[in-house]
Amino acid sequence: MRRPSRVATFIDKGGTGKTTVAAHLGVALSEAGDDVLLVDLAGKQGDLSKHFGLWDEVEESIAEDDDWPNISTVFQDEWDIIVEKLGDAAVQDLILETDEGPDVIPAHPGLDSLDAELGNIDKPSERYSRLDDFLTEYVDPLGYDVILVDLPGITNNVTYNGLWATRNVVVPVEAGVFEASQLAALEEDLDKMDENFGVDVGLSMVVPNKVDRRTKLADEYLAEFREAYPEVVARPVPVSQEIRNAANEGRTVFDVEEPSRTGERARKRFADNADELRSRIADKPTRTGVEAVSDD
Ligand SMILES: Nc1ncnc2c1ncn2[C@@H]1O[C@H](COP(=O)(O)OP(=O)(O)OP(=O)(O)O)[C@@H](O)[C@H]1O
Ligand SMILES: [Mg+2]
């Protein structure tokens, strides 16, 4: 059996489109025929599940005390014992179906204290490898083609678990000096992971998001990103009110009937980027973009 490709959406900055990109790439991959699992590690607000209209259901189960096991449970020491007791149901309990193709493991309020709990684990190799262990042992056998992990916009023990487990990162950026510097900082962070732990995380794709080509600034930053990361900059995703509206309605733009021209273009860009991503992450967790800028 082939191991699923894994990828995380991450940048140490809020609001650039990590969750939007995870949801849309997930649906695009699914429409192209892949079995996709989305994993929400981005925090208790449940943005990824909201994207598919599933968060009310999750909140209900929390209110009814029917929220165990959940995604935060898989990081605990007791997880193996839970699986021993519940068998396959333990993992199946975590997974919800969306009506746009991908399955999703929703976030949970337990993620809030997870960073601190992981911080109590002395050995880095144990602190950062919990998600990897869970995916390898319990999720890989389910036969998904792609596992996409949505991470919070902050560097902590949870994001390290996400990067460690996926070895591939997709970075949504907006046109701004802050994004450019955060992207450089991320590269340094990935280098440190490699040096310290021998974990080689590939910068698989930089997605310029919310791009308004009518502004000169957007063009300038696009050119800058392309120069700095020639191998990994993806096709830009336009700023689109339809993306925002769809998210508020609990769906992606792929589910919008008769989208506007901008909505249509956003769809096309996500589909093209999903194709490109698939070929980049298939069986090769390499760091293509990093070599490209290392001589600067
Ligand atoms: N291409 C786009 N056009 C218009 N709005 C967008 C686009 N991409 C994302 N948005 C909107 O921007 C906001 C932030 O997006 P999103 O939640 O995906 O970012 P994030 O990086 O996951 O944020 P956080 O750091 O809070 O997790 C949302 O309201 C989303 O609908
Ligand atoms: Mg998010």
Image: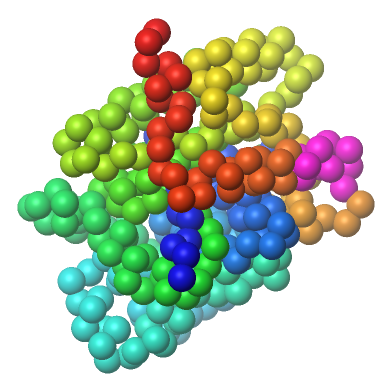
Task: Choose top left, top right, bottom left or bottom right for residue 80.
Answer: bottom left
Query: Looking at this rendering, what residue extends furthest in the front direction?
Result: 1
Residue 156 pos. (x, y %): 28, 43
Asked if one can make out residue 270 in the rendered structure from this viewpoint, the answer is: no
Give the color scheme: rainbow, by chain, secondary structure or one colour: rainbow
Residue 290 pos. (x, y %): 40, 25
Residue drawn at (23%, 52%), measured in percent from left and top?
A: 128
Q: Which corner quadrant holds the C terminus?
A: top left
Query: Looking at this rendering, what residue extends furthest in the right direction?
Result: 258
Residue 244 pos. (x, y %): 70, 45
| Side (left or right) of 146 relative to 200 | right
Task: Choose top left, top right, bottom left or bottom right for residue 239.
Answer: top right
The foreground one among 272 and 105 is 272
Residue drawn at (14%, 49%), measured in percent from left and top?
A: 124
| Side (left or right) of 287 relative to 117 | right
| Side (left or right) of 138 relative to 31 | left
Task: Choose top left, top right, bottom left or bottom right for residue 75.
Answer: bottom left
Residue 266 pos. (x, y %): 76, 40
Residue drawn at (44%, 34%), measured in percent from left and top?
A: 203
The foreground one among 203 and 52 is 203
Mostly what secondary structure, the magenta segment? helix
Query: Looking at this rendering, what residue extends furthest in the left direction?
Result: 122
The correct choice, above or below, for 39 with respect to 157 in the image is below
Magenta-colored span: 259-268
The correct choice, above or below, for 280 with respect to 231 in the image is below
Question: Does the magenta portion include 261?
Answer: yes
The correct choice, above or below, for 274 with respect to 174 in the image is below
The foreground one among 45 and 165 is 165
| Side (left or right) of 129 relative to 215 | left
